[in-house]
């Protein structure tokens, strides 16, 4: 994920920041408790495509 693009993107629900999970290829919105998929390098920022984060995932520190 291009870091310049990541700086421009926000969660469509909360308008808060997103972090990129390299292992899962997802953009994570901790404030919305959602993880948006990145398919073929393209972020899919649709609520119905996102998965809900578990409490355990929210407790973990995000990796830069």
Image (cartoon, rainbow, N blue to C red):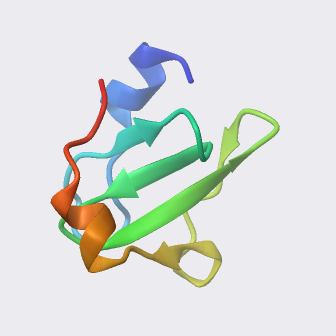
Q: Measuring 23% from the left and 52% from the top, which residue is drawn there?
A: 60
- In the picture shown, does residue 37 fall above or below 31? above
Q: Measuring 60% from the left and 84% from the top, which residue is drawn there?
A: 48
- In the picture shown, does residue 46 fall above or below 7? below
As rendered, which of 33 and 62 lies closer to the eye? 62
Can you say which quadrant of the picture contains the N terminus?
A: top right
As rendered, which of 28 and 9 lies closer to the eye? 28
38 with respect to 40 (left or right) = left
Give coordinates of residue 10: x percent, y percent. Answer: 32, 49
Give coordinates of residue 58: x percent, y percent. Answer: 23, 64
Dividing the picture into quarters, in which one does residue 4 lie? Answer: top left
* Numbered disc total: 0
Dividing the picture into quarters, in which one does residue 34 lie? Answer: bottom left
Dividing the picture into quarters, in which one does residue 32 lie? Answer: bottom left
5 with respect to 15 (left or right) = right
- In the picture shown, does residue 27 fall above or below 58? above
Give coordinates of residue 45: x percent, y percent. Answer: 54, 60
Q: Measuring 62% from the left and 42% from the top, which residue is drawn there?
A: 25
As rendered, which of 46 and 29 lies closer to the eye? 29
Can you say which quadrant of the picture contains the C terminus?
A: top left
Q: Name the residue furthest right.
A: 40
Q: Measuring 73% from the left and 33% from the top, which residue is drawn there?
A: 41
Give coordinates of residue 21: x percent, y percent. Answer: 47, 40
């Amino acid at each position: 994920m291009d870091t310049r693009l990541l700086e421009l993107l926000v969660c469509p629900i909360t308008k808060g920041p997103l972090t990129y999970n390299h292992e899962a290829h997802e953009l994570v919105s901790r404030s919305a408790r959602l993880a948006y998929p990145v398919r073929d390098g393209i972020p899919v920022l649709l609520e119905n495509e996102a998965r809900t984060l578990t409490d355990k995932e929210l407790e973990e520190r995000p990796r830069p």
